[in-house]
Image (cartoon, helix red, strand yellow):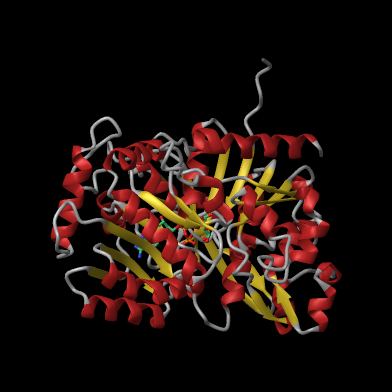
Amino acid sequence: MPHKKPLKICLASSEFAPLAKTGGLADVSASLAAYLHTAGHDVRLILPFYDTLDTSGLDIVPVDYLQQVPISIGPRHGHFSIDMTTLPGSGLPVYLLRCPDLYERGGLYTRDDDEHRRFILLSRAAIEMCQHMGFAPDIFHCHDWHTSLIPLYLKTTYAWDKLFSRTRSVLTIHNIGYQGIFDAGIIGDLDLKGGEGELHQDDLKLGRINFLKTGVLHAHQLTTVSPTYAQEILGDEYGMGLQDLLRTRSNSLTGILNGIDEAEWNPESDPLIPKPYSAKNLAGKAACKLALMDDLELKGGGERPVIGIVTRLTSQKGIDLMQKVLPGLLHERDFALAVLGSGEPRYERFFASLQNSLRDSVCFYRGYSNKLAHWIEAGSDIFLMPSLYEPCGLNQMYSLKYGTVPIVRQTGGLADSVQLIDPGAATGTGVVFRDYNEKALKWAINAALDLYANKPVWKKIMKNGMAMDFSWNHQGSMYVDLFRTLSASR
Ligand code: ADP
Ligand code: GLC
C-alpha cells in the first residue's frame, strides 16, 4: 500500500477534557485529537485559557513568537497570547489562548454582552496562530457554534492569505440546540472586510446573526456525531430551525458516531472506581455496587437494583419524563436511584425533593464530579438516559463498557449504539423505547427491572454490551477517510 502523508489538522474547540469540560464535547475533542495525534497526524489544538482550566500536573510554556499579538475586534483593540502544553498520556500538544479580559470569567460560558467576542477571538486566533506558525492545515476542524465562524473567516477576512488556499473546513455539530444567536448589531465585531454579504441575509433582515448557521452555510463539509442524528436534523422535529438549510447541504453532511476514550473509561483499569473488573470476572462490579450504595447511603444491599443517572439537567435529557414517572415507580417497585447532575434549578429541585422524601432509595448529588460519574457507571445495574434528543451521547456507551444496562430512547446516537434486548434469545444490549411519553418510559423501566430478576439472561446482556467496540481506533478512521477525501478534492 502506498505510504499516506500525515494530515495537518487545526482543531478549535471551546472544551477539552480534562482541562475544560461541561459535557461530551470536551471528551470528544480531546479523545479525537489524541487519536489523530497517535495515528501520526500533525494536530494543532487550540482552546481558551479559562481561569477555571484545570492545570494540575501540566507544564505550560509561552510560545515566544505568539505573545501579546495585537488584534482588533470591531472598534476594540487588544492582544492575545498563546501558551503551549503537552498532555501527559498522549503527548498531544495543546495551545492555550490567553486573553484574561475575555476568558477569566469563572466559567466556560457566560451570559455577558460580549459572549460573541469571546468566541470570535477563539476563531480568529486559531487562524492567526496558524499564520504565525506558517502552518497550512489540510483541515480546519471546527466544533459547534463557538468556532463556526472559521469557514467564513477563511473566505473573507483571511482570504488574502495563500497559506490557506488548499485548506478545507469541517464543522462538526455536536448539538444543534445551541446555535450562538446574537443581535445583528454585533456585525461590526465580525470584521468581515466587505464580506457581510456572505452572512445569512434573511437572518440579518430579522435582526440576528446565527453563528452555527453561518458555519453550516460555509464549511466545506459538515459532520454530526451519529448517523441517525444526521438524518434527524434534516427534519422539522429535530432541525431546530436549521433543517431547510441543512437539506440544501445534505450531500455534504455525514454522521459519524463518537468514539470513547478507552484509556479513561475502562472498568479493567479505571483508577477512580473501588475495584476493577472485566466481562470474565464480574466480582469487582458487585463490590463497586456495594461501595456506591454505602457511599450514597442507599439501603437494600446487593440484590436491590440500582439505577444510575449522570447528566446535565436540561430538557434535552428527558428530565420532564422522569419527573412524571419516577416518583410513582419508586413506590410501586423496589429499586434505588443514584443521580449525579446539575443544571436547571427546576430539575435540581425535583431530584432534591425526591431524595428528601425517599432517602433510603434516592441519592442526588448536585454538582459535577468526574469520580462519582465513574462510580455510578461502575456501581449501577441500569443506566437511565431517556433523552428528548441526543446527538450522540457518551454515557450510554460508558454504561455498556461497564456492564451497566442502559435504558434509552430511540433517538440520535442512542439509537445507533444500543440494541434492543430480546430476552428469549438473550441478544441485544439495552432497553430501547421510542415514544417520548410517560407510558413508554414506564414500560422501559419496568422491563429492565423485570429482566434484572432473570439473572442468567441479565448477565448475558451485560456481557453483550461489554463486548461492543466504541473505540476511536474504529470511529477515528472514519474522520481520517473523510479528511483525506476532502483534501484530495481541492
Ligand atoms: P452532553 O454532552 O449532552 O452533556 P454526553 O453524554 O455526550 O452528553 O456527555 C456528557 C459527559 O459529561 C460525560 O462524560 C458525562 O460523564 C459528563 N457529565 C455530565 N454531567 C456530569 C456531572 N454532573 N458530573 C460529572 N460528569 C458529568
Ligand atoms: C453534545 C451532545 C451529546 C454528544 C456530545 C459530544 O453535547 O448533546 O449527545 O455526545 O455533544 O459529541
Q: Is residue 46 left or right of residue 248?
A: left
Q: Is residue 488 left or right of residue 135?
A: right
Write the residue at 38% across / 38% down: 466
Write the residue at 83% across / 58% down: 248
Residue 35 picture location, percent across and down: 50, 37
Residue at the front extreme of this rendering: 424
Residue 71 picture location, percent across and down: 63, 67
Nearest the eye: 135 or 15: 15
The answer to whether residue 412 is visible is yes
Above-or-below relation of 92 to 315: above
| Quadrant of residue 360 within the rendered picture | bottom left
Nearest the eye: 225 or 75: 225
Residue 342 picture location, percent across and down: 37, 72
Above-or-below relation of 339 to 88: below
Above-or-below relation of 250 to 422: below
Query: What count of labels does the image hold?
Result: 0
Write the residue at 34% across / 82% down: 349
Q: Quadrant of the C terminus?
A: top right
Above-or-below relation of 37 to 309: above
Residue 338 picture location, percent across and down: 27, 63
The answer to whether residue 274 is visible is no
